[in-house]
Amino acid sequence: MNVKNQMMIRFESRSVNEAFARMTVAAFVSQLDPTLEELGDIKTVVSEAVTNAIVHGYQDKVGYITMTVRLLEGGYVEIKVKDSGCGIADIEQARQPLFTTGDAERSGMGFTIMESFSDKLRIRSTVGRGTTVTMLRRIAGRGGEEPV
Ligand SMILES: Nc1ncnc2c1ncn2[C@@H]1O[C@H](COP(=O)(O)OP(=O)(O)OP(=O)(O)O)[C@@H](O)[C@H]1O
Ligand SMILES: [Mg+2]
């Protein structure tokens, strides 16, 4: 799929930056004229992925998170969230609803939510090296029909 526009940001894994990442993606994606529902879905997915990088990937330390957003042909948005944190030992297990290694605050539903709001969700991870989550989501836009 051809890339029509793209951007990349890198920020520290501090919890205040979860809102920053979510708003930045919303601002960039707004050129597709998304519906409020589509925008909400994309913000939710970004929020879950960035929160995971902050709380699980880096745990008690601070590291960099790189987020890449690509606008592809056919109204598809590809969002990549990459950390260089601890990595995930068993990705299949991590994707299961209710599975969590976190504390009582976590419900283990992040990946399930990301999956339900994405057309495609890919997780790549190496223990000790980090995790990259790639989400693909089509935006029909407020025009409703095929985007140009
Ligand atoms: N970026 C990451 N780095 C390391 N481990 C991760 C990362 N993202 C997810 N995980 C692991 O996968 C598990 C499942 O993640 P998921 O987002 O589904 O649930 P959660 O974060 O534990 O809870 P919730 O998202 O509901 O608050 C996490 O508990 C953690 O063990
Ligand atoms: Mg989570």
Image: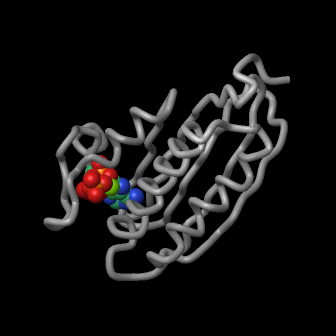
Quadrant of the frame with the C terminus:
top right
Specify whether 6 is left or right of 63. right
Residue located 46% across and 35% down the image = 117
Q: Position of residue 90 (x, y in %)?
A: 26, 45
Quarter of the rendering containing residue 92:
top left
Quadrant of the frame with the N terminus:
top right
Residue located 70% across and 30% down the image = 141
Q: How many marks?
A: 0
Q: Position of residue 64 (x, y in %)?
A: 55, 73
Quarter of the rendering containing residue 107:
bottom left
Name the outermost residue toward the top.
Answer: 145
Please determine whether, in this image, residue 50 is positioned above or below residue 91: below
Examine the rendering and report whether any part of residue 22 can be seen: yes
Coloration of the structure image: one colour
Q: Which quarter is ligand 1 in?
A: bottom left
Name the one closer to the observer, 136 or 40: 40
Specify whether 4 is left or right of 117. right
Examine the rendering and report whether any part of residue 88 can be seen: no
Residue located 47% across and 60% down the image = 50
Specify whether 112 is left or right of 19. left
Specify whether 28 is left or right of 46. right
Residue located 80% across and 35% down the image = 3
Name the one closer to the observer, 14 or 31: 31
Q: Position of residue 73 (x, y in %)?
A: 78, 26
Please determine whether, in this image, residue 69 is positioned above or below residue 75: below
Q: Position of residue 43 (x, y in %)?
A: 53, 51
Please determine whether, in this image, residue 145 is positioned above or below residue 22: above
Name the outermost residue toward the left.
Answer: 104
